[in-house]
Amino acid sequence: MLSEAVPALRREKMSTVDTAWLRMDSDSNLMMIVAVLMFDKPMDTCRFRDIVQTRLLSYSRFRSKVVRDMTGGAWWEEQQVDLDHHILHYRLRSTGSNNKALLEQMVSRLSATPLSLARPLWQMHLIDNCIGEDSKTRQAIVIRIHHCIADGIALVGVLLSMFDQAPDAADRHATHSAVSLDEEDNPWMHLMQPVTKSMVNAINLSASMWSKYMWMLADSNKLMGRLSDMGNKAGRLTIDAIKLLAMPDDSRTRLKGKPKGAKHVAWSEPVPLNEIKVIGKALGGSVNDILMASVAGAIGAYLRSKGDSVPGKTDLRAMVPVNLRKAGDEHKLGNAFGLVPLVLPIGMEDPIERLNEVRHRMDELKGGYQALVAMAVLGVLGATPKQMQNEIQNYFAKKATAVMSNVPGPQTPLYLAGSQLDQIMFWVPQSGDIGLGVSILSYNGCVQFGLVTDDAIASDPHAIIQRFAPEFEKLVLLALMSEW
């Protein structure tokens, strides 16, 4: 089915940051955001297609294919959209009490399958007969969207614009309204409090100016003598840029290697969010502290289960995307985020010691500008020759083992084409030689962990993901003991 005809062929120049994401695709890592949405019952397919037509396609980027030019840049070019190429329908075979493994295998294959550049860079796969670990039969939608269209925060807004608050809601067009999330629910918001609109607008400086600035930052000895002449914010920005550029390579664990492109995904069962909040309050940590400590514990336990030596001071660096949009701009597409390096203490086996260390490291990140600098680097990458982009990209990939996203979703039930959304998982892409992705998403009072690994790094993501709950349960037990 074709969308309504585009009145006139329209082109829009792609930003340098979005171009950087377009050009990061490689045989080992595709720059796709992948989401899995689980519904309580099959949707009305005709109604679903109408919703995609009226709500999703109201965003021009979902009607536009990418056209490259001779200079290395790219354009968005609108075209007619044939939904038969973008919405595909499958049915999983029954294997007994549950076939979750078959669904994970399908998502793994799709995560390593490129989208066609001949069409807009998104696709949805409706999958029937998905039987979960709780023996319930659901319908799944696997959504694949190229990162050059938008980042995770913006895509949450796009997805929310498709949903209704009730199963029998009247048909409507997309409102493009901003995502309404309490600041308390966003675990990374406090990191970016010092960032002002003028500072984010500074990213719009020409790529050549930013290139010169970044090379100046690399020569830290010259700059350190000038910091006393700069304002506090400018000085902190420069210091954080130097820290980002001078980061040592990450620890050499079995999770650090060269990916080959074959992906494996896994996700946990939902954990009640209120339970995490209660434990965090009892132990003097935030929800985010509890989650990060559990992730660090799970990774450390996995490495030890493989017989690896994991000394107490072993760390693992994860790059965490942080939203740089001003309030009210969450619905605007494109990429407007930076990356904060979070160092996880995976060698600490004592749960309380590990939680305290995570909290301390999170506090150290507050008030910093590393995410802003990282966004500037992405802008530079999109305007440099492809070979130079690869070199810079691989340089930063050596500094981290994982990409980790923690996104707060809505805490009330949502409905699409008459069916209730039960669960939602997602994975962000890993660039360069990073082969591990960790995702945490909260929705409707629950939290779920997701994991994607490359076959060359680890072919058994379940062996990691199944350790998240036990690590959290250790904190639960210690919180209960502290009450005695």
Image (tube, rainbow, N blue to C red):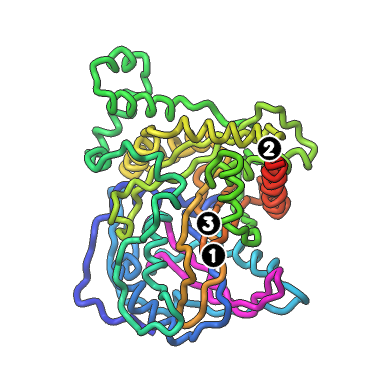
461 in relation to 389, above or below: below
Judged from this view, the residue extending furthest toward the left is 8
Quadrant of the image for the C terminus? top right
SS class, disc 1: strand
Q: Label 2 to label 3, Cα distance in Å?
A: 22 Å
Q: Quadrant of residue 366?
A: top left
Task: Please identify the dominant SS of the magenta region.
Answer: strand
470 in relation to 97, above or below: above
Say what amino acid the circle numbered 2 marks: Pro
Q: Label 3 to label 1, Cα distance in Å?
A: 8 Å
The picture places residue 18, in percent across and down from the top left corner, at 34, 51
Q: Which residue is mark 2?
A: 351
Residue name at image x 37 percent, y 46 percent = 337
In the figure, is residue 413 to the left or right of 182? right
Q: Which mark is residue 424?
A: 1
Dot 2 or dot 1: first in sequence order is 2
Q: Which residues are magenta?
A: 120-148
Local packing at callout 2 (Cα closer than 10 Å; few below 14, some 14-19, many 20+) is some
| Magenta stretch contains residue 386 | no
Q: Quadrant of residue 235?
A: top left
In the figure, is residue 253 to the left or right of 249? right
The picture places residue 388, in percent across and down from the top left corner, at 40, 37
| Magenta stretch contains residue 130 | yes
Q: Which residue is mark 3?
A: 441
Say what amino acid the circle numbered 3 marks: Leu
151 in relation to 483, above or below: below
Q: Nearer the viewer, mark 2 or mark 1?
A: 2
The picture places residue 74, in percent across and down from the top left corner, at 30, 55
131 in relation to 150, above or below: below
